[in-house]
Image: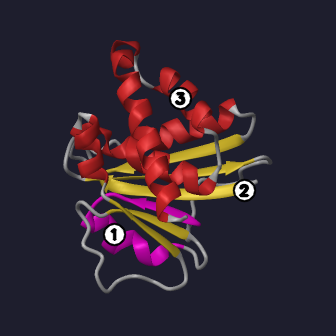
Amino acid sequence: MNHDVFMAGFGGQGVLLIGNLLAYATILEGNNASYFPAYGVEKRGGAANCTVVMSDGAVGSPVVGEPEAALLMNPAAMGQFYPRVRKGGMALINSSLIDDEGSSRADLTLVRIPANEMALEIGDSRLVNMVMLGGYVEYSKVVTQEALREALKEVLPERNHRFLPMNHKALEAGAAFVREALA
């Protein structure tokens, strides 16, 4: 197994949280992971992105020029990172914020997921990141949903454990959406 994914959005969307969560879940399953976050100086609203490299062998570098997958959560991320997705790869885009008309590529799998609307239906707009991650994991099968749920207990501070059920619901909603979209 050797997978890499790039996640991008703006600060406050939880991009760095889901990158850390995915890396932790990978490690819980006995594989190696590298998590490389990057963000602007603003606390919220600035650019935020991360790369996660997962492997059953050694991970040489966390830097990936052409990721095999990308989770793109806002228009700026789409404009900057969509062209870099490797041919034959996959892009999961938040269609609630990104109008993708005319920019689709025939050389990759593109899934448009209305993550903002789905998060609101679950009960909290902050769940957009979990909807996106659940969709990516369903597509890629890099880790199990169970590993994500276990890792979430470790990654989220204990004071936020009361939100675990909603996060689980968001992960499953994203997975279900992608399952249906690719059926």
The nearer-to-camera label among 3 and 2 is 3
> Which of disc 1 and disc 2 is earlier in sequence?
2
Q: CA distance from mark 2 to mark 1?
A: 24 Å
- Vertically, is 117 above or below 172? below
Q: CA distance from mark 3 to mark 2?
A: 22 Å
Residue 112 placed where, x, y %?
A: 37, 66
Residue to which mark 2 is pinned:
2
Residue to which mark 3 is pinned:
149
Nearest the viewer among 114 and 133 is 114
User: Around disc 2, counting alpha carbons within 10 Å, would you say few (fewer than 14), some (14 to 19), or many (20 or more)?
Assistant: some
**Residue 72, quarter of picture:** bottom left
Residue 48 placed where, x, y %?
A: 33, 51
Disc 1 residue type (three-letter)? Met
Nearest the viewer among 59 and 149 is 149
User: Around disc 1, counting alpha carbons within 10 Å, would you say few (fewer than 14), some (14 to 19), or many (20 or more)?
Assistant: many
Q: CA distance from mark 3 to mark 1?
A: 28 Å
Disc 2 residue type (three-letter)? Asn
The nearer-to-camera label among 3 and 1 is 3
What residue is at 72 percent from the left and 56 percent from the top?
A: 2
* First to last magenta residue range: 68-85
Residue to which mark 1 is pinned:
78
